[in-house]
Image: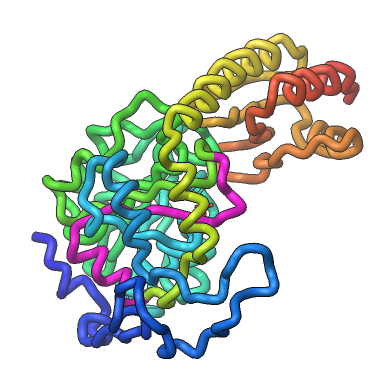
Amino acid sequence: MFELQKLLRPHIAAIKPYSSARDEYSGSDGVFLDANENPFGSITQEAFNRYPDPYQSALKVEIAKIKNVSPQQIFLGNGSDEAIDLLFRAFCRPSIDEVIILPPTYGMYEVSANINDVKLKKVNLTADFQIDLNGILEAISANTKIIFFCSPNNPSGNKLKRQDMLSILAQFEGLVVVDEAYIDFSDEPSFTTELAKYPNLLVMQTFSKAWGLASLRLGMAFASVEIIKILNLIKPPYNISGLTQETVLAAIGNVSAKDQMVKSLLVERANLQESLAAISYVQKIYPSDANFLLVKMKDARKVYEYLIDHLIIVRDRSKVVLCDDCLRISVGTPAENQHLIQIMKKFQA
Ligand SMILES: *Cc1c(COP(=O)(O)O)cnc(C)c1O
């Protein structure tokens, strides 16, 4: 059985919330002399002199509507990376606890584990980038706190089998993270639909990919109200800038513009796939549910360097497990993709 209080690091379970100035009075009218702000305003056109809402309430109301969860089930972080780090800090005792990741996968889980001195167990995906269920079950120990699934997976691009993730969710007593950074590009329903059933589930999404807002740094985590309370308890008080909150609040009203970009990217992904397949030294293009393609080719490293020489930057994944001779290529605009293909066609080993 999943028991949040037992899973938490003991000192975290005992922390009393820090009360920021904006916590103690949350109204917007009044003479604010409580936070040592500059009352004259800012030296910029827009006024940035007041601290932002520490809980991003207005934004969460709107996100809750489009994600079909309650605002209390949402944590917002300075990118998904902040949520990942906070999970380590909340649940994993340094040099005692463990997490499980499934390489090849997103690099930040390992970076955060290393920073927090948490042991990492790696259970590689299978050759077709699916979950090794038995491998995971064997790797789980009494000190395993978190299992990270990334679906659609970075860098392979495919979605993981839902049934396998549900099976782990049902059996594992620790926290299961499903990182859905690329969910908008997939026809798979989000795991947020499973939150009511699994108290040990945390789903991560981001404004960095489909929404085109990577620079604003806004990541979302969806989980039970109890888990979200813990993340709010240990986050830096003003972790999301006012500029980010306002800008995303304005953008989120325009879901259809996001959907239109996703649609274009999917068309372009298919075009890019077709053009890449016609290149003589390309050996395999892996199926993608994301906005990038993992492409296996002869002499990948040389192609990577050749592309750099032509000012085209892709991601070299050729030294990553199960990705021998693979480059990860983001889907660009039609012109960018055509340019890439044109240059790639001229490559000679
Ligand atoms: C890009 C990406 C993210 C997004 O991270 P942010 O910090 O929100 O920009 C998260 N997870 C995966 C797997 C990604 O590829």
Report the magenta residues as a range.
212-234
Quarter of the figure that contains the C terminus: top right
Q: Position of residue 140 (x, y in %)?
A: 27, 58
Q: Colour scheme in the image?
A: rainbow
Residue shown at the point (69%, 73%) measured from the top left: 43
Please determine whether, in this image, residue 16 is positioned above or below residue 347. below
Q: Position of residue 2 (x, y in %)?
A: 13, 61
Q: Is residue 235 left or right of residue 304?
A: left
Q: Position of residue 31 (x, y in %)?
A: 40, 83
Q: Is residue 119 left or right of residue 283?
A: left
Residue shown at the point (37%, 52%) measured from the top left: 148
Please determine whether, in this image, residue 329 is positioned above or below residue 123. above
Q: Is residue 276 left or right of residue 80?
A: right
Is 326 one of the magenta-colored residues?
A: no
Which quarter of the picture shows residue 199? Answer: bottom left
Residue shown at the point (57%, 70%) measured from the top left: 48
Quarter of the figure that contains the N terminus: bottom left
Q: Is residue 126 visible?
A: no
Residue shown at the point (28%, 64%) measured from the top left: 144
Q: Residue 149 or 73: which is nearer the viewer? A: 73
Q: Position of residue 158 (x, y in %)?
A: 45, 30
Please determine whether, in this image, residue 342 is positioned above or below residue 307. above
Is 233 one of the magenta-colored residues?
A: yes
